[in-house]
Image: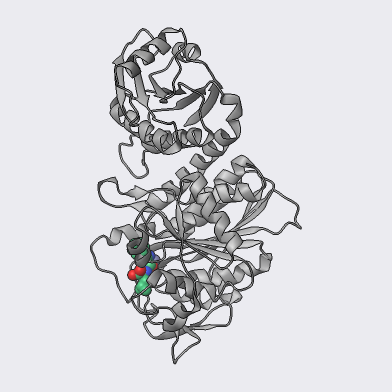
Amino acid sequence: MNFELKPLTLVGVANEKCDVLVLLVQQDFKPGKDDLSLLVAQAVKAGDLGANSGQMVSLYRASQANAPRLLLVGVGDGKAKQVRTAVVSALGSVKASLGKKLVLAFASAAQEDAVRAAVLAVADATYSYTHAKSKPEPRTVQRCLLAASNASELSASFDRAVATVLGIELAKEWANRPANHATPTHLGLAAQALAKMPKVSCELLGPKEVAKLGMGSFMAVAQGSDEPLRFIVLRYSGAAKTKAPTVLVGKGITFDSGGISIKPAAEMDEMKFDMSGAASVLGVFRSLAHLQPAINVVGLIPACENLINGRAVKPGDVVTSMSGQTIEILNTDAEGRLVLCDALSYAERFKPAAVVDIATLTGACVVALGSVRSGLFASNDMLGNALMSAGERSADLAWRMPLDDDYAEGLKTNFADVANVAGRMGGAITAAKFLQRFASKYPWAHLDIAGTAWKSGAAKGATGRPVGLLVEYLMDQAGTK
Ligand code: BES
Ligand code: MN
Ligand code: ZN
């Protein structure tokens, strides 16, 4: 979809030809003398666009607009959250007849956050997954014009929002694809396709290269499947080579059966989403290619299936990770940390300014935080605070979790340097403590997105999180606001 931002007063908005015109009306709306203003003023006076956001008046072929459908929607104080709810309910109400061109206009001066929220909400409400459908129903809206009288002040946040949508949609696309359409090989090809964009390059490692690097932990997970593993290295080079990069590491388990410690059958299909961390890394690179900030970013994706064949790793097996630390694999379903730990060791070679891993790592994190906030762990407060505030600014929320050493007690074992699981308690934290052992050489953070990366039930599908948070964080690092 093509987004555009235009400085328009309500007179201009009324003249804009389109299929649907959505007018967002703040509480403090001051009408002009034009017809559209007067119409809105009447609706406000009648109490139809009150303080509660989402209150809506729907008109057909109104003379005050150059569109068959006109929706006046109340957005209360015009804050991001209000705007999001209003846009989602407005578009939901005309879903069947959205047409090709949508105009979304702010009746009063728009706030930066609100513009961002509007762009993301339009994209989300009109998203359509079509891959592998014999009769695809692609998104109907092709152009979305955002109009606000103060548009000239909003272009930076608008551009960032549009770039974020590109990233979110790429992440959703890959996370939504079933495991047989999103193998490690396919993910490698997706990364190579990204490398066609400016300043992006990609290197793919296969089983031989990974063996040579000594990634015994990653290989142990991959050995239970006939699909060959991939270790994907993406680079975005927007600054001088001497500038230390931020490294993003995305868990790329393209299907998680649990291995020999097999998962229950119910909802096992959802484990196709276990590469959502990897998908978010691909998405962030898409956004970076669009925004071209002056930073360096490396993306690492250890990708494989966690399956069960005659060579599959067994509970009790001990493997040697790239770091040299030996690991007793007590539960083959705790595979995410086994692929991530080798990627974290690999990250050292970039002498990174910071490393952030993103993983659908634990069911325990879903229990702790539900689907509202991602779990955020950080060995460094500056990094932790920066990620936390990037989440708030982008409305892609996280919550800081603890990393006290006492939580690592349960990872002790008589048979190796460390076990891959501790007891049932504090499972999201013990997983993070395991990872921390491999991330001692640089400031490190870990985002557990098990609860936020996808939705279950009728609206089952990937959310594209935490692309918004990460893009915001990286743009902040680039010194752009
Ligand atoms: N991919 C899962 C985590 C997960 C579970 C994400 C449910 C989203 C929903 C991960 O590989 C896993 O299986 N973790 C285990 C760890 C346990 C064996 C210590 C879990 O959370 O049950
Ligand atoms: Mn698992
Ligand atoms: Zn998993």
Expressed as whole percent of the image width and height from the top left, the position of residue 333 reads: 36, 72
Q: How many marks?
A: 0
Residue at the spot 67% in from the left edge and 68% down from the top edge: 349
- x, y (%) of residue 346? 60, 69
Residues 423 and 28: in front is 28
Tell me if 54 is positioned left or right of 7 in this view.
left
- The reply, left or right, for residue 325 in relation to residue 20 is right
Which residue shows up at 41% across the image and 38% down it? 81
Q: Is residue 57 above or below residue 166?
A: above
Most distant residue in the bottom direction: 414
Color style of the picture: one colour
Towards the viewer: 185 or 412: 412
377 over 118 or under it: above or below: below
Q: Position of residue 187 (x, y in %)?
A: 48, 55
Q: Where is residue 105 in the image (x, y as percent from the top left)?
A: 45, 23
Place residue 253 in its image quadrant: bottom left
Q: Is residue 127 left or right of residue 116?
A: left
Identity of the residue drawn at 56% across and 44% down: 287
Ligand 1 shows up in the quarter that is bottom left
Residue at the limit of the structure toward the left, as seen here: 266
Q: Which residue is at the front of the view, 452 or 274?
A: 452
**Front-most of residues 318 and 440:** 440
Q: Can residue 266 be seen in this view?
A: yes
Name the residue located 36 percent from the left edge and 7 percent from the top edge: 63
Whether residue 232 can be seen here: no
Work out which quarter of the rendered image holds the C terminus and state it: top right
Say which quarter of the image contains residue 351. Answer: bottom right
